[in-house]
Amino acid sequence: MSRIPLCTAVWLSVLGGPLGNTASAALDLVPWPKTVEVKGGALELTANSRVVAGDAALLPLANVLAGEILQTTGRQLAAVQGEAAAGDIVLKLDPQLKGEAYALLIDKSAVVSGANYAATAFGTVTLLQALANEGGKLSLPLLVVADTPDDKLLYRLNLPTAEEKPYTGPLTFTTTTTVFARMVDAAGQQLGEVLTAGFGDDGFRRNLLTDPGVEVIVSNTGAGDKKFITDGYADPNSHWNGIAQPAWVKVKLPKAAKINKLEVCCWWGDGRAYRYNVEVSMTGKDGEWQQVVDMKQNAKPAEGAYVHEFAPVDAQFIRINMFGNTTNGHNHLCELRAFNAEK
Ligand SMILES: [Ca+2]
């Protein structure tokens, strides 16, 4: 039985993965926005360019975008909140926009606007796709884009009797369930295949790491945001990325548990394999850690979660030490889950 959460499929289907280096200036936007006006010319991103959040609520998104730009181009832009200057990428909240609509205006700066975090995030995906990297020179074509993503994910449980519903958030199951999900466009036409995921009775154990009181400590600020490690969503585009060695994440549970399963979600999309090991401890003190997972030589490509099951072990601390991946030295972690051996 698969335990891949449905939310993984949502984000993968809607957003796609980060692009590789875009050597061509040709626009290749997927999905193509509702309106795109190409002005001619380009905005160059210089050493002074930043990702500026016009609102505190968008600072995490600014960090995510800076992380994605680093990942796809090797260029680190500062992510800050405050006043923007020419040459910056600017994220703004615009209450005039409705729902998931966003606007992207690239002129003397690149401004992405949406009514909320999610809408603005859609705009940043389009911006990333438009970003050109020619010999290390980063630029954005001068554009005016207005878009309203209207793909929807519909699901039904245990065909054929259940009613089809729009997916709006994580689903919880307490009985054996099969989920059928499909993406449709604004006209109701199905996009891609029907996704199927089965959730069987292995105890319906909760992920301990989304419990209140869980503390997450990271070795370095890196890129992205550590909050994504235990937010309950395995979205590869929202992650912490420990760039420098040592790169580790230490999680303290509010109380000790008997753990026998871990799921490690890094980043996936291009066949890369991540390398790490996981240790557990009752005290968190040096010399009192026990390795339960050894993936230091891993060659298996990341695709959703790496699932690790082992003999039950008492632990209050979990530490993942990360050693890069087969593509680069980055250490993305978009979700870490730990499961109690006991119901
Ligand atoms: Ca996450």
Image: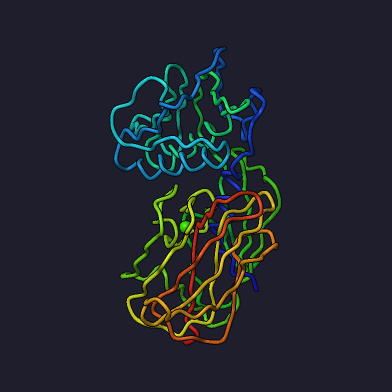
Q: Along the line of sight, which residue is nearer the eye, 254 or 279?
A: 279
User: Which residue sits at x=56%, y=21%?
Assistant: 36
Q: Which residue is farthest top?
A: 40
**Residue 259, percent across and down?**
48, 82
Q: Which residue is farthest front?
A: 287
Q: Is residue 92 above or below residue 335?
A: above
Q: Quadrant of the N terminus?
A: bottom right
How was the colour assigned to the protein in this rendering?
Answer: rainbow
Q: Along the line of sight, which residue is nearer the eye, 225 or 38?
A: 225
User: Which residue sits at x=50%, y=85%?
Assistant: 341
**Residue 270, percent across and down?**
68, 49
Q: Is residue 301 above or below residue 83?
A: below
**Residue 143, percent across and down?**
52, 19
**Residue 278, percent across and down?**
52, 72
User: Which residue sits at x=60%, y=71%?
Assistant: 307
In the rendered image, which quarter is residue 253 located in?
A: bottom left
Q: How many marks?
A: 0
Q: Is residue 112 above or below residue 68?
A: above
